[in-house]
Structure formats: C-alpha cells, structure tokens
Image: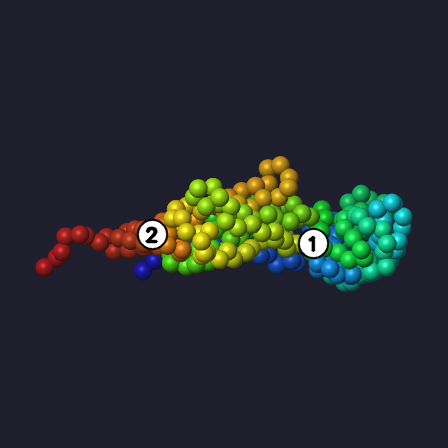
Amino acid sequence: MINRSMYYAVTTISILMMGIYVLPASAEFMPSEGMELVASADDGSTIVHVTGTTIRDDPVILRYISPTNNLVKLDQLDPSSDGTFASTFNVAGLTEDGLYRIIASQGEASMYKLEVNVPISDGTTPDILAIESNFERPTMLVGPEIFDGGMVLTADAMEGSDVIAISGQTDVTNMPIIIRVLAPNGNVVMTDQILMDEHGLFAKDIQIGGPLWSQDGDYTVIAEQDIEGYSTSAVVGVADGVVVPEFGTIAALILAISIISVVAISTRSRLSIIPKF
C-alpha cells in the first residue's frame, strides 16, 4: 500500500503533468488595493458593456472621450458590496469614427485611474474585449508550468484524434491573440484571432483534416500578440490526418505513477525478485 506522503507525491505529479488550470477563489486572492476596468462588445453592436472591480467603496467616475478629445458621456457609479460596477455605452448616435477612450477614476490616486480604448465606426463596434488592471494576477497552472508573466501555450491531443486542443495564458489582456498553424514544410494551414478572459486565459480547438493537412510530420501551433516577446509555439505530430502517438504528458504521467508505485511497494514490502518455494 502507498503511504500518505507517496500518495501526495503522485497527486501533485498528476496535476502538474495533466495541465489542469487551478483557478483561485476570488475572495482568497482579492488584493488589498487596486482597480480593474473592462470594455466588451460584439462585432456590429451599438452597445459597449463597461464593467469593473475596485477595492474602494467611494463612487467611480466614468468618462467617455471622443477621438477629438470631447466628453460625450459621464457616469457616476457606486460600487456594489463586492466592489463591482457596471454601465453601458450606446454608440449608435456617434458620428465621429475612431478610438473612444473610457476612463474610470476614484479620487486622485493614480492606482485608481484606468483607461481602455474602444474603436467605433459608423456607430458600431468590432468584436472587442479591452481590459486594464493593476490587480496582481492570480497564479495559474498552465500545462506543466506555473504562469508568472509573458505568454505560455500548450497543445494537447489524444492519439488518433482529429482535434488539437490548445490553451494558454498571457498577461497582456487588451489585444487579441493570433493563432497560426504551420505545416511541416512551413506553409500556413490555419490562422485565427481569439480573445482571452479577464485572467489572460485563452483556449481553442483546432480541427485537423482536408488537403492542407495532407503532409505527415510535425505541425507547429503559434500563438502571438502584436508586442515584442509575446510569441510562443507548440508542436503536434500528424499522420494520415490524425494525431500520431508520441511520448506526451499522459504517457509520462502513467510512467511516473508506475515508477513511484513500484518504488513505494518495494520499499514497504522489501519485495524480492527471487521466488520463494
């Protein structure tokens, strides 16, 4: 029987190698000070949803500034008991195209003054998620590593599957992530643009198949943002239009648990390889 300490070791390795996200409870990780501001809208929408969180309980002032620096709307919001606030910005009647600034502030402290930008054209918005925050980000497990800033990416797929599940995290949350997949010969077989959540987490399923996936070999999945240093990649083997077997995280997990189990059992029972009669 595996003792308690060995059980904890197996459990820890299992979590790290399977790439489970550890999402902290918000109450446990709520910082002692700071503010977050989020603006989101669907493509072609006339409504921008403005939300946020603050540690302070005094009113939040929201100012909406046009591309020519004119004030087009002013809100004063009282945060709820959990520090959240919300409003909407109707852009249907705006005749000036360009970037509109949404500024949230509480008092004079710079920590409590945040700004996000929203592009407006012909009274509608593109698909957008703009986030500014000075909260310390909670620690996440992304694949086998702990996220501590920058960008990380994992690509997982079962042997014989025609879907590659990618996931990752970035600490730049106000610009989209561009996903590209390169064939073994370097040709681009897929490109897409995705958004992350408020923690910078992102995920997407990539479908394998078709003439662009006809080459056998290693396909490179690239995630990048339009900022220096924010580009990372992962490699997945493909043959005959499906994922090929490799010594990936599941195989490594099984091996690790097997080795630990054998060592634990051998140590406890002093198992001998010589049979007794």
In the picture, measured across the screen, residue 251 lies left or right of residue 119, that is left
User: How much space separates mark 2 and mark 1, taking CA atoms?
Assistant: 42 Å
Q: Residue at x 71, y 51 (%)?
A: 130
Taking depth in this image into account, of 224 and 76 the one nearest to the observer is: 224
Image location (x, y in percent) of residue 105 = 83, 50
Judged left or right of residue 167, residue 46 is right
Which one is in front, 74 or 188?
Answer: 188
Can residue 90 be spotted in the picture? yes
Q: Earlier in the sequence, mark 2 or mark 1?
A: 1
Q: Residue at x 90, y 48 (%)?
A: 70
Residue 8 visible in image: no
Which residue is painted at 75% across and 56% down in the image?
Answer: 125
Nearer-the-camera pick, 6 or 235: 235
Name the quadrant of the N terminus: bottom left
Q: Which mark is residue 255?
A: 2
Disc 1 secondary structure class: strand
Q: Who is closer to the viewer here, 257 or 240?
A: 240
Q: Residues within 10 Å of mark 2 (few under 14, many from 20)?
A: few
Q: Where is mark 1, residue-wise?
A: 129
Across and down, in percent, residue 256 comes to 35, 51
Question: Which element is circle 2 on?
Answer: helix
Camera-side mark, 2 or 1: 1
Which residue is painted at 53% across and 42% down in the image? 232
Q: Amino acid at mark 2?
A: Leu
Quadrant containing the C terminus in the rendered view: bottom left
What x and y, as percent, mark residue 55?
A: 75, 54
Crowding around mark 1 (Cα neighbors within 10 Å: few <14, some 14 to 19, many 20+) is many
Amino acid at the residue labelled 1: Leu
